[in-house]
Amino acid sequence: MPRDPVCGQYVDEKTPFKSEMDGETRYFCSEECQEEFEFGVEDDEFVEPVGRSPKEED
């Protein structure tokens, strides 16, 4: 089950609140979280999905 990258809540994939970015679908619990994410991406506020860490370089 995916997590909302804004609030961290687990979200059903059937939610109507989704956004495609860099070939990956982000799922949101509400329209408010989706809008916050989409506006925050412009400011690099949300760049990694919750629960993921940046890839380590060797």
Image (cartoon, rainbow, N blue to C red):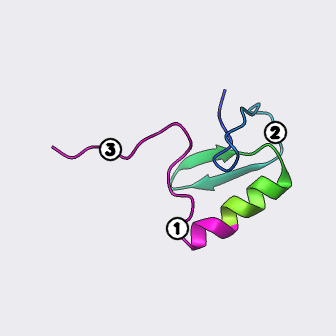
Q: Which mark is residue 30?
A: none
Outermost residue, top direction?
A: 1
Q: Amino acid at mark 2?
A: Thr
Classify mark 1: residues with Cα within 10 Å, few (<14), some (14-19) or many (20+).
few
Q: Which sits earlier in the primary sequence, circle 1 or circle 3?
A: 1
Outermost residue, bottom direction?
A: 43
Q: Are marks 2 and 3 in contact (CB under 8 Å)?
A: no
Identified at 67% across, 40% down, the residue is 8
Residue situated in front as seen by the camera: 14 or 50: 50
Q: CA distance from mark 2 to mark 1?
A: 24 Å
Identified at 21% across, 46% down, the residue is 57
Outermost residue, front direction?
A: 7
Q: Secondary structure at mark 1?
A: loop
Question: Could you tell me which quadrant the N terminus lies in?
Answer: top right
Query: Which range is magenta?
Result: 39-58
Question: Could you tell me which quadrant the C terminus lies in?
Answer: top left
Query: Which residue is tagged 3?
Result: 55
Q: CA distance from mark 2 to mark 3?
A: 28 Å
Asked if residue 47 lies in the magenta stretch, the reply is: yes
Q: Return the x and y of residue 46 as percentages of the image width and height.
A: 56, 58
Q: Return the x and y of residue 45 as percentages of the image width and height.
A: 56, 64
Q: Amino acid at mark 3?
A: Lys
Classify mark 2: residues with Cα within 10 Å, few (<14), some (14-19) or many (20+).
few
Q: Are marks 1 and 3 in contact (CB under 8 Å)?
A: no
Query: Which residue is tagged 2?
Result: 15
Q: Amino acid at mark 1?
A: Asp
Classify mark 3: residues with Cα within 10 Å, few (<14), some (14-19) or many (20+).
few
Q: Secondary structure at mark 2?
A: loop
